[in-house]
Amino acid sequence: MSCPPPATIRDLLSWRIHRLANALSRGAARRYRRDFGVSLMEWRILALLGGFAPLTLRDLARESGLDKAQASRAVKALVARGLVERAAGATDAREVALRLSAEGARVEAGLMQAARERDAAFRAALPDGALEALDAAIRLLHAEARRQTPKE
């Protein structure tokens, strides 16, 4: 089955995915701000540290899709609130390793529970077989996006 070529920006697949991602992010941002007092950027950092700590600022920025300055500001705010701790890196003392504090781990556990609830609702909205097709499509599109991204 072939589709006609996009006539306007609203027909572009990348635009439609961008709009979907924004809608998903807005809903998450409102809930995480209301229930946990964290921004979407802070949620991403807490979730990454909860699953993969210790991480460097560079690793956090890369994994979260933030630039290093954005990640640095968010980490600084999380450290000031006592949710994230800094320590010297294991292999290089000049590098800073980041991990959750005990309070950060408590907040992250609540955030992940809320994220799992949202995820379950999204999955339930899809008919049988659609999730597998969506997963396959996301993998293919991600690979194509990486292929089209020029190397720096």
Image (spheres, rainbow, N blue to C red):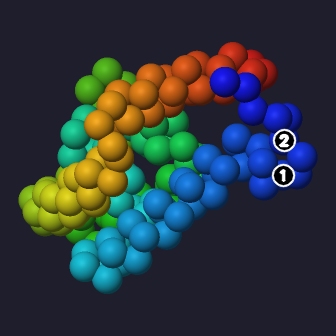
| Any part of residue 60 in sight | yes
Q: Residue at left 50%, top 30%?
A: 138
Q: Position of residue 68 (x, y in %)?
A: 57, 46
The quadrant the N terminus occupies is top right
Report the front residue among 58 and 17.
Answer: 17
| Any part of residue 58 in sight | no
4 vs 14, left or right, is: right
On the image, numbered disc 2 is attached to which residue? 6
**Where on the picture, by quarter, is residue 83?**
bottom left
Work out whether 129 lies above or below 143. Answer: below
Q: Position of residue 119 (x, y in %)?
A: 28, 52
On the image, numbered disc 1 is attached to which residue? 9
Report the front residue among 135 and 36.
Answer: 135
120 vs 131, left or right, is: left
Q: Position of residue 72 (x, y in %)?
A: 50, 55
Q: Residue at left 56%, top 48%?
A: 66
Q: Position of residue 127 (x, y in %)?
A: 33, 43
